[in-house]
Image: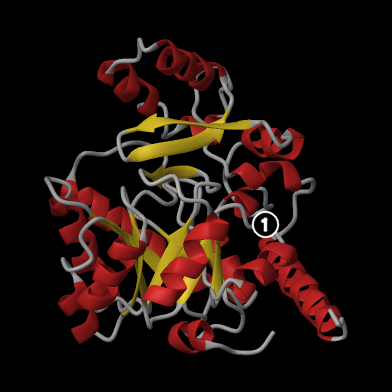
Amino acid sequence: MKNNRICELLSIKYPVLQAPMSWITDAGLAASVSNAGGLGIIGPNSGAQSVTTDVTETGERLRSEIKKAKSLTDKPFGVNILSYEGDRFQFSDQCVKVILEEGIAVAAICGDYPEKYAKQLKDAGIKQIFRALPSNNVEVAKRAEQAGMEAFIAAGLEGGGHIGLDRITTFVLIPQVVDAIRIPVIAGGGIVDGRGMVAAIALGAEGIYLGTRFIATKECPAHSTYKQAILDAIDTSSVTFTSMVGLCRALKTPPVEHFVQMELNGTATEEEMVMLHRHETRPWLEGDWSTTVFPVGACAGMIKEIKSASEVVNSIVKEADEIMKNMCIQDFG
């Protein structure tokens, strides 16, 4: 796997990025991904065991996890910052203050406002990559580039968790974004192995962004019920439904199936939606199938083994290299 713009930008060996997933992508997982040559990413709730509404506590939780990650790796890792319009900014402002104080290498911005922290982070020498929500399309990619983002994560409908409003599949979204902007594109949504990596590269992406594959790792603190459900998944095990940030994709647990049926019947309410998403926190660590939303990508059915994070990174790169080598000797003549 040759170095490309993503590797050079982020000072990593392989263009494999671990998506930040609230609660279950802690310092241990992120450090393991970074040590393997990819880029691990933590977030404000990473490593936490309970919900907090205290702004200062949110920042100090993040600081603690950053310090832990630094103790586990001397490689670059990223920190996820939410950048949405509205009252969430008080929490994100505090988290940005912490990452500036702690000297983080990479900020992974997620939201609808790429301009918010761009100058602060750039002035501090922090690399910025951006994933747009609730919209994730060509126009948003252009706006991110104009705001000063240095790479854009284009995640298709196949992805897990919050996937936005636009319902554009990975195979269609990636080449259009690549054609529209000059900064490098990182592909997400349904990628779990070297085949997906090669497909993303063929579409013009220069890196891949994986969430579900890293849940099913030894280092991920997600409950064994969550991990086993991924191993047991088939192609139809996930479903999309309306969330507070566009669509969400998750496993067909009882509360998810109930809400999806309500949507089909036209009886779903905003109150029901809010109630459903209240379960998107600690139960990921507790594994209660009957009450929990377990976000996964449509690729879950392709994952059949719990591996270490380093095994995931290395197997993806090795498989991709082998595929590209074999493709070079093929002749369509």
Report whether 302 appears left or right of 181.
right
Residue with the most extreme front position: 333
**Which residue occupies the foreground of this view, 132 or 41?**
132
**Which residue occupies the foreground of this view, 195 or 58?**
195
Q: Is residue 154 visible?
A: yes
What residue lies at 49% left-to-right and 53% top-to-bottom? Answer: 156
Report whether 305 appears left or right of 285.
right
**Occupied quadrant, residue 204:** bottom right
Check the image and report above or below for 295 versus 182.
above
Check the image and report above or below for 228 versus 327.
above
**Position in image of residue 41 (x %, y %):** 46, 64
Residue picked out by circle 1: 192
Packing grade of label 1 (10 A; few <14, some 14-19, many >=20) is many
- Report the quarter where the C terminus lies: bottom right
**Position in image of residue 88 (x %, y %):** 17, 47
What residue lies at 69% left-to-right and 67% top-to-bottom? Answer: 310
What residue lies at 45% left-to-right and 67% top-to-bottom? Answer: 176
Report whether 78 appears left or right of 309.
left
What residue lies at 52% left-to-right and 72% top-to-bottom? Answer: 39
Report whether 77 appears left or right of 12.
left
The amino acid on which the numbered mark 1 sits, given as a three-letter code, is Val
